[in-house]
Amino acid sequence: MFTKIQFDIEDVNKNKVVATICNVPLLFWLLFVTDKNSSYIKHHANHGLWLLILEVINIIISKIPIVGMFISGIIGILILILAIYGVYIALQGEGRKWPLADDVQILK
């Protein structure tokens, strides 16, 4: 499900901290003020952007009475788990292919 992706070791060592922060949904934009050519940062910034999109969808779903609040809670927990997992993977100096998020890359 989350297959491993290999990156250049120099790219990883140089950009590990920024890639880690890019996994936080509202901070994916750090890609644009750092090394724009880093595939490692782009990979993790793309995941951060997808998590931000999920958060916006989650806010919209939460407006649905009763059922929306329940579904929103589940999606919120999922977003939190994915963000923590992304930070963990970035700190390891790795990348993982996420279903859908890596099939449709917004940041290229």
Image: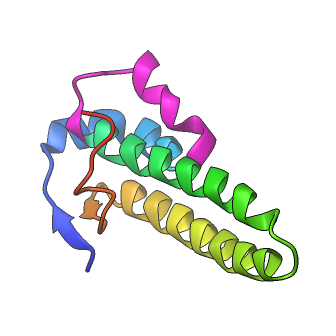
Question: Residue sitting at 59 percent across and 66 percent down?
Answer: 79
- Give whichever of 24, 9 is nearer the camera: 24
Q: Residue furthest top?
A: 33
Where does residue 56 sit, x and y in percent of width and height? 65, 50
Instruction: Check if residue 27 falls in the magenta segment.
Output: yes
Instruction: Classify residue 95 as left or right of residue 50.
Output: left
Q: Do we see residue 24 in this rendering?
A: no
Residue 62, compared with residue 90, is above or below; it is below
Decide which of 83, 105 is in the foreground and name it: 105
Name the dominant secondary structure of the magenta segment.
Answer: helix
> Number of marks in the image?
0
42 horizontally vs 25: left or right: left
Viewport quadrant of the C terminus? top left
Q: Can residue 37 be found in the magenta stretch? A: yes
Q: Which residue occupies the extreme right position in the image? A: 65
Residue 89 figure quarter:
bottom left
Q: Is residue 62 visible?
A: yes
Q: Quadrant of the N terminus?
A: bottom left
Q: Nearer the viewer, residue 92 or 23?
A: 23
* As drawn, 80 above or below 9: below
Extent of the magenta region: 25-39
